Amino acid sequence: MTTTDLIPADENILDASVAASPTPSTLGTIDSTGDVEHELNEMDASADALRNEGLLSPADHEQRKADVERTRKLFRELPPEQRQAIIRRRRELGLQILDRELAGAAVVPVALKLNHTRLRPLFEQWWPYMNRMSLNLQRFGQSTFTRAELSTLEAYLERELSKLEDYVDEQVRVAKAYREQRETEMRAAGDIVFAPTIQRPSLSLEIQAYSRFAVRALQVLVKFDQTMDQFDFMVWNGIRDQSDVNEEVSRFLRKFQPLGLRSYTTHLKLMTTVRGI
């Protein structure tokens, strides 16, 4: 079996509250730099999008929006330490799913390395669910959704992933070209040029991918990690300000979130079918 190298150059693992609710809270999917209000707004917008695409009935749409408001109120009333506990729990569940091997599943081992700390929560909070969802959608999609719903869902996932791929391709291309241009200018002017490197990656592990979709999602993270390598050079050499870089990273996190959220809610929907078989 070959290993796909992304280093640059169980169905039962859901807590009781998630398993019992068809529209559970996804607040735990926020990373440490995220904003709870932004996550709730994404959930609200997702409900509208699902309704517009025919994936939610009017009653389900209203119920989901009511759930968002109820969750917003409850979360605001929680002490900070309990909020952090929810976030940690969601990440822990994702990692537990990541560690489980599925019998009979054809997998591709992937050697994953992410240098930057801000991308690790994004991976832990979304990708395990995206990976499992992509497999269960192949296995149980027709048993879970109508033909029209399945077609709409698959089209959405492909469209959003393709948009992310285009975005990170452009980001890494532009960042690399700008870095090379400025580095050439600095050397020509006799300036001191620093070449920072990360000696200890934020994440380095081998995982099992269940589909091309899952591998493509990983590649999106890896390419933006490469973009952040270019940002490191720019900050060290005074080419860009750290606050500008932080805005670029936050923009990417926001762009990734809708695909992660839809994949997560689809995963939960598929799990109701899996448990019923």
Image (cartoon, rainbow, N blue to C red):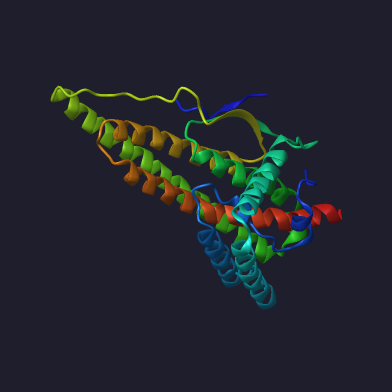
Q: Would residue 54 be found to the left or right of residue 256 on screen?
A: right
Instruction: Give above or below for 265 relative to 240.
Output: below
Q: Residue 258: which quarter of the image?
A: bottom right
- Residue 13 in sight from this viewpoint: yes
> Hey, which residue is sitting farthest right in the picture?
277
The residue under the point 66% across, 69% down is 67
x and y, in percent, of residue 237 in the image? 26, 31
- Residue 134 in sight from this viewpoint: no
Q: Would residue 120 be found to the left or right of residue 187 on screen?
A: right
Instruction: Give above or below for 215 relative to 149.
Output: above
The residue under the point 72% across, 41% down is 97
Numbered-mark total: 0
Q: Residue 10: which quarter of the image?
A: top right
Front one among 91 and 205: 91
> Hey, which residue is sitting farthest left in the picture?
189
x and y, in percent, of residue 101 in the image? 76, 35
x and y, in percent, of residue 189 in the image? 13, 25
Instruction: Give above or below for 247 relative to 48.
Output: above
Front one among 186 and 111: 186
x and y, in percent, of residue 77 in the image? 62, 64
Front one among 28 and 213: 28
Quadrant (top left/top right/bottom left/bottom right) for the N terminus: top right
Q: Would residue 52 be found to the left or right of residue 223 on screen?
A: right
Q: Would residue 260 be found to the left or right of residue 243 on screen?
A: right
The residue under the point 56% across, 63% down is 40
The residue under the point 57% across, 64% down is 46
